[in-house]
Amino acid sequence: MHTNDLLRSNLDKLNNRMQDVSNSLSNVFASVHPDQSLSCENLLHYLTLRSEDIRSMQDELHILGLSSLTSSESHIKSQVQAILRLLGKEIDPEQISKCDYGTGRNLIASKSARLFGVKNDASIPFIMVTFDTDFADNHHLIRKLLKSGMNIARINCAHDDLETWEKMIGLLKASSDELGIPCRIYMDLAGPKLRTIIRGRGKKENKIMIHEGEIISFAEKDADFDPLTSVIGCSEIGILPQLKSGQRVMFDDGLIATEVLSVEDGIASLLVQRVSTKKSTLKAEKGINFPDSHLLLPSLTKKDIEILPFVCEHADLIGYSFVRRAADIKQLQDEIDFNNGKGSIILKIETPEAVENLPSLLLQGMQRPAFGVMIARGDLAVEIGFERMSEIQEEILWICESAHVPVIWATQVLDTLNKSGIATRSEVTDAAHAAMAECVMVNKGEHIIQVIETLRDILHRSGGHHVKKRYTFRPMRIATRFFDAIQLPEQSEV
């Protein structure tokens, strides 16, 4: 068979498989909000494509000067059909995709505007700034943030209280009105708080020395442990019985790595495999990650539910921490409805389980007219491994683009600049990648104004270039897992 004929045949099979998915999953389209119908179908078409290995086909398309299907996430079936027409294939009018390039771009733009509001500079992403406690009394700083380009103010509900949040919101709204600069309010629900407690030796100092190769204990409060030994607890109860030997437990943003040797009588023995801090010290209130454990913990905690009436009254956007399954999203959607909330949910992707379940999370999010995704790269990097972070964050961007879901690029953006006043080369490169998202989040810091100004400059320089990079598509495990789970009928290979 001639190369062009073979290529056309393979593309035709792909187009037909996308149509089969549309026919087989028509009930899924019917279940989402009407404003999400096209986005839902395009997401499923993209997952169809990404469950195949089409790299050789991409090479052939590129050689012929045709689209290799990269940068087509927002309108994937339409792009396949456009290539088929160029290769001489007539498309059944009833199968022509309604989600073309213009429609895909408009859907993402309209949903971004719905979530994040309007901005003066359309050429760069929206900018979100995390508020600190002292922002509640700093009118001058909030005015400077607004003038520098802040579009969204983030309030982390893991810190402070309703009174402080109310002061922040009041000052922000007053400053916004004075300057005529709109700014949305994002409130982050804390979710389960997995933090260290020093139970044994070092309890008074709230810190212990830890060395590679030693064995430490991880214990519940009522366990019978030797108080003179190194014993660590977790602020969230009920974790220990869910651990199994061989699983990893990471402390302090992954700086200390351990492995579970055994779990007996309410105490887990942990072998310290790595200590990546010069002081070899673990303090209380440091984060704990369980990357290999599927913990049965509520994403929406009792405290989250208690503060939700306030959050629903004031927030335009509601950040959802520790989300892992579609049922988690359904619970928060119901709670927001109960409280007559106006805020749209932002799904924080920060665990391996959330990455694996991303398509299902997006489909549940589509029960509402708009929602967003935050790539919470701090916890996510610890959970999945730093070496996989670059790959996973791009996969999340691609899949969200196919679902027309706005993305927030978060965690440690220009962090060294924020702390010291000068950026590292690597974090400038990292910040440039943020141009692929619809919004970028920066944390509080001594040099926050300089961070915003530098970020805007970097985004201006890089924003016009990232779509020109050519990628090749090997099978994406997120896509194959999704279709394995719903057990579609077998299709011919592309």
Image (cartoon, grey):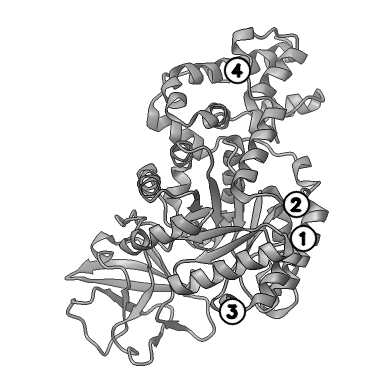
Name which of mark 4 and mark 1 comes first in the sequence.
4
Q: Can you say which quadrant of the picture contains the C terminus?
A: top right
Q: Comparing marks 3 and 1, which lies closer to the viewer?
A: 3
Distance between the alpha carbons at the discs numbered 1 and 2: 7 Å
| N-term-proximal mark, 4 vs 2 | 4
Residue with the mark numbered 2: 124
- Residue 456, label in figure: 1
Mark identifier at residue 15: 4
> Sequence order check: which comes first, mark 3 or mark 2?
2
Tag of residue 346? none
- Mark 3 or mark 2, which is nearer to you? 3
Residue at image position (44%, 55%) is 312
Q: Secondary structure at mark 1?
A: helix
| Mark-to-mark CA distance, 4 and 1 | 40 Å
Q: Position of residue 118 (x, y in %)?
A: 69, 49
Q: Looking at the image, do the residues carrying marks 4 and 3 touch, with CB atoms under 8 Å apart?
A: no
- Residue type at mark 1: give it: Arg
CA–CA distance in space, label 4 to label 3? 58 Å
